[in-house]
Image: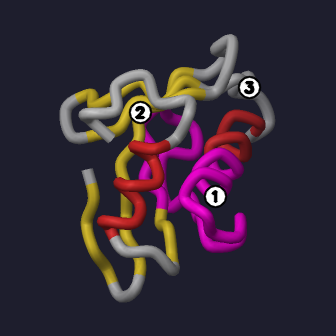
Amino acid sequence: MCRRTIRRYRNSYLCQPRASKTEIIGLHGEALKIRIAAPPVDGQANAELCRYLARHVGVPQKDVQMKSGVSSRQKRVFIAGKTLADIRAALTKSPSTKNPEHP
């Protein structure tokens, strides 16, 4: 799910756009599956994913950068300023997490 780079973590996400609300579903292979309450039009779903991750991990939105998967459901995102343990703990405690055992 996560690979450490210099002071950043690259996370893998599988996104399902046009959901009724944005929420974490659980693991799908090595990726974290997240339902996104935005359509995949003009980058709206990508922007919602970055906003959601920034809000729940507790970093400024500028520290969440999509590195690949802009037009795919499989995304790679860099999150700066937090450790892997911080990211997992934050996403596990998120009130929108459906399966807290698998952040």
Which mark identifies residue 38? 3
The C terminus - image quarter = top left
Q: Residue at x 21, y 40 (%)?
A: 30
Residues in magenta, as a range: 50-77
Nearer the viewer's eye, disc 2 or disc 1? Answer: 1
| Location of residue 74 with respect to 82 vertically, above or below | above
Assign a secondary structure to mark 2. Answer: strand
**Label 2 vs 1, first from the N-terminus:** 2
Neighbour tally class for label 1: few under 14, some 14-19, many 20 plus, Cα within 10 Å: some
Give the CA separation, mark 3 to mark 2.
Answer: 14 Å
Give the CA separation, mark 1 to mark 3.
Answer: 16 Å
Neighbour tally class for label 2: few under 14, some 14-19, many 20 plus, Cα within 10 Å: many
Magenta span contains residue 66: yes
Q: Residue at x 40, y 86 (%)?
A: 7
| Location of residue 58 with respect to 30 vertically, above or below | below
Give the CA separation, mark 2 to mark 1.
Answer: 17 Å
Q: Are marks 1 and 3 in contact (CB under 8 Å)?
A: no
Residue ranking furthest to the bottom: 6
**Label 3 vs 2, first from the N-terminus:** 2
- Looking at the picture, tell me which residue is in the foreground, 15 or 70: 15
Q: Which quadrant of the view contains residue 66? A: bottom right
Q: Which quadrant of the view contains residue 11? A: bottom left
Tell me the residue that label 2 is attached to. 14
What colour scheme was applied to this rendering of the protein? secondary structure
Q: Is residue 51 left or right of residue 100?
A: right
Tell me the residue that label 1 is attached to. 54
Residue 53 point in image, percent of width and height: 58, 51
Q: Is residue 102 left or right of residue 75?
A: left
Residue 34 point in image, percent of width and height: 48, 30
Q: Residue at x 56, y 34 (%)?
A: 95
Name the amino acid, label 1. Ala
